[in-house]
Amino acid sequence: MKSINVVVTSAGGIVAQGIIKSLKYHNKYSRHKSHEYKIFATDISYEAAGLYRAHKFSLIPKPTAKEYLNSVVKVCNRNKIQILFIGSDVELPILCKNKEFIEDKTGSIVITSQPHIVEMCRDKYKTNEFLQENKLNSIPTCLNHEIDGFLKDHKFPLVVKPREGFGSKLFQIVNSIEELDFASKAITQTGWKPMIQKYLKGDANEYTTGLTLGKENNQIMSTITLKKILKHGQTYKAFIDKYPKVTKVCNQIAKKLKTFGPLNIQSRIDGDDNQVKIIEINPRFSASGPMRTVAGVNEPDIMVRNVLFNENVKIQDHKSLVCFRYWNETYIDKEKYEKVMIQKRYVKTLNSSIIDYF
């Protein structure tokens, strides 16, 4: 059986932990598997749960540090890494932009979309412009200086959110021009830029769709949609089923983007016209990835099979499931934890335990 060395960055975050879960699920539960994963993890802090669920780990500098890229190269070379998975939005643009540099220096394959796709998708206003130009289910949107004209066609409540950012940070539903101004100033004070959108009624009709796109002609290898209920910006209840209306739109967007790698599209059914409207596009793996894996669509493994084994993967079906998320704990012996922090080795090993008590 082939052993594949992979590294997952930002092991303290929910996206990275989802990738680790999917890889470990493959190792433990996949039938007729021809390969298994040896998982390395990185983070900037020892207080990152994902480090202790990987086989080995290394601490690296913050992505803003001068030595960050060299540290990533060092991790890949020291551990003979074959695949690098990006586990956070903060690292995504840096590692995407330097994909060729890392691959040339290490021989590792960095799983990421093209830089222009990442740049566009990180700006929600530019994303909406792309959707509008291609008649792909955009939401009516404006910038602050266009608000007077916008209010002639769209009434309160409205949504104010940053063009940048991720999750639900500084997302606000406003009911007056005073609230709109306050929300916009709060975004501006962080150094970000605000945008205004029509509020889509129907909180119970929000979806997240995951796609994987292959290296040859950007073919769609898998598509899976979850109907989700959010809490603090994250999916905490999910209904995995067939949602052809949503899936069709997301497949159209993926084909138009002509991108590569994982793609995650957030959408909602507009209560006014019953049409699918796109909230945002994220060119990365999703925090809900483990749910998709258990349903039969293991997106990290699909990407590995495509880029490493040249498989033209095509997942046609998946299970229908209901998922309820809950808090869980992982434990480390305190003495071992303190000891590993003072070790001078660059690559370290310490495994935590999860107790089956729920």
Image (spheres, grey):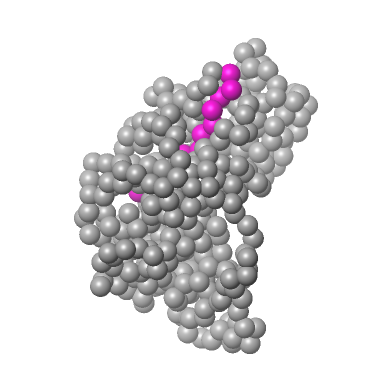
Numbered-mark total: 0
**Is residue 323 found left or right of 168 in the rendered image?**
left
**Residue at image point 65% right, 20% down:** 147
* Residue 69, picture quadrant: bottom left
Give the position of the N terminus as an image quadrant. bottom left
**Residue at image point 26% right, 71% down:** 2
**Is residue 270 found left or right of 307 in the rendered image?**
right
Residue 145 x, y percent position in the rendering? 63, 23
- Whether residue 214 is visible: yes
**Is residue 150 found left or right of 66 in the rendered image?**
right
* Prevailing SS of the magenta stretch: strand
**Residue at image point 42% right, 66% down:** 24
101 versus 160 height, above or below: below
The magenta-colored residue range is 260-272
**Is residue 206 found left or right of 155 in the rendered image?**
left
Outermost residue toward the top in this view: 152
Residue 127 x, y percent position in the rendering? 47, 33
Residue 210 x, y percent position in the rendering? 43, 44
Residue 87 x, y percent position in the rendering? 48, 58
Query: In this orientation, which residue lies closer to the viewer: 309 or 274?
Result: 274
Asked if residue 262 is among those painted magenta in the image, a careful observer would answer yes
- Whether residue 43 is visible: no
Query: In this orientation, which residue lies closer to the viewer: 237 or 100?
Result: 237
**Residue at image point 43% right, 29% down:** 245
249 versus 16 height, above or below: above
Give the position of the C terminus as an image quadrant. bottom right
Asked if residue 120 is among those painted magenta in the image, a careful observer would answer no
Query: In this orientation, which residue lies closer to the viewer: 212 or 226?
Result: 226
